[in-house]
Amino acid sequence: MRIAIGSDHAGSGYKQRIAAHLAEAGHEVKDFGTDSPRPCDYPVFIRPVAEAVARGDFERGIVLGGSGNGEAMVANRVPGVRCSLCWDLRSARLAREHNDANVLSLGERMISLEAALEIVDLWLATPFAAGRHERRIRMIDGEA
């Protein structure tokens, strides 16, 4: 799978570990930055990830910050992106099954690295259930 990834300074540690984990699993990963713990403005790094997913350059995107809240908000401003903030396995599974989330937001200050990696793996492996959820996805995307 082609995956875009980006973070602010507060998510840069996990971003590097997640990107390496994804590459080891055989995914193609593009890192949109930042690569520094120095304070920065997260929209600079998050919006390009969301735009690349929306254009179809990447099948999925992962964005990270301290809590993941601001990153999810930025990503969801891009038409065609359905970004879900996940802090556990259940939210990750439901984000894919029910909402067909194409971008995942994680908070480095909210969960352990082990939990983040488990969430990423489950989120990538979980298919969209379609059915009754398709109509709602079309509504989210302004198509119904």
Image: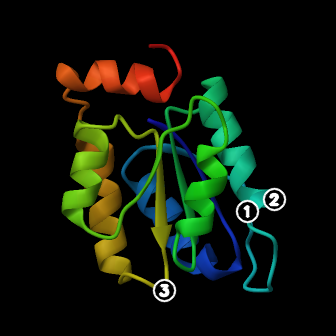
Q: Tag 3, which secondary structure?
A: loop
The reply to whether discs 1 and 3 touch (Cβ–Cβ < 8 Å) is no
Kindly report which numbered mark, 1 or 2, lies closer to the viewer in this rendering.
2
Pick the residue in front: 118 or 91: 91
Q: Earlier in the sequence, mark 1 or mark 3?
A: 1
Separation of disc 1 and disc 2 at Cα?
Answer: 9 Å
Tag of residue 109: 3
Q: Is residue 91 above or below residue 87?
A: above
Residue at (66%, 54%) from the top-left corner? 74
Type of amino acid at the residue the image marks with label 1: Gly
**Position in image of residue 43 (x %, y %):** 76, 59
The reply to whether discs 1 and 2 touch (Cβ–Cβ < 8 Å) is yes
Residue 57 seen in this snapshot: no
> Relative to 31, is 134 on the left or the right?
left
Q: Tag 2, which secondary structure?
A: helix
Q: Which residue is mark 1?
A: 33
Q: Which residue is mark 2?
A: 44
**Position in image of residue 131 (x %, y %):** 18, 19
Q: Residues within 10 Å of mark 2 (few under 14, many from 20)?
A: some
Separation of disc 1 and disc 3 at Cα?
Answer: 18 Å
Pick the residue in front: 56 or 107: 107
Q: Is residue 29 above or below residue 42?
A: above
Residue at (60%, 24%) from the top-left corner? 56
Residue 29 seen in this snapshot: yes
Separation of disc 2 and disc 3 at Cα?
Answer: 20 Å
